Amino acid sequence: MGQVHVLRGSRKQLMAYLKSHPEIQQLTVIITEDEDKIGTARRTETVLPEGVRVLNGVPLFPDLPNMVPVTVEMVRQLLDEEKVPAD
């Protein structure tokens, strides 16, 4: 089962969290600028359904048996169908 953890806090708080959880070996870090200084680390845990693939920390849509790649031609066709007024 895949899990996504979102951690937020100061550098000191995040370092303390990571030191207390040595089992965490892989990280993806997003550094934001000019963010509110909250003063407390917040952790949000999300449990993903069984079999959900995660790529770079982002859960992916499941593979379906009838999936086909989306092409520019398919998008154009769908846009053209939207433009045709319904009777």
Image: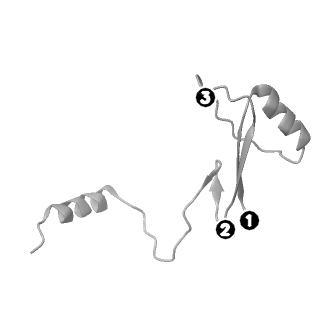
Image location (x, y in percent) of residue 42: 73, 41
> Relative to 49, is 40 on the left or the right?
right
Q: Which residue is mark 3?
A: 32
Residue identifier under label 1: 1
The answer to whether the residues at label 1 and label 2 have Cβ atoms under 8 Å apart is yes
Identify the secondary structure beneath mark 3: loop
> Are circles 3 and 1 on residues that touch, CB within 8 Å?
no
- Could you tell me how far apart the alpha carbons at marks 3 and 1 are, in whole angstroms? 29 Å
Q: Nearer the viewer, residue 18 or 56?
A: 18
Image coordinates for residue 47, horizontal then vertical, percent: 70, 61
Residue in the image at 46% along x and 71% along y: 67
- Left or right: 77 as drawn, with respect to 51: left
What kind of element bears circle 2? loop
Front position among marks 3 and 1: 3
Q: Secondary structure at mark 1?
A: loop
- Name the residue furthest bottom: 65
Callout 1 amino acid: Met
The residue where tag 2 is placed is 49
For badge 3, the amino acid type reads: Thr
Residue situated in front as seen by the camera: 64 or 73? 64
Give the residue displayed 88% in from the left and 48% down from the top: 23
Quadrant for the C terminus, please: bottom left
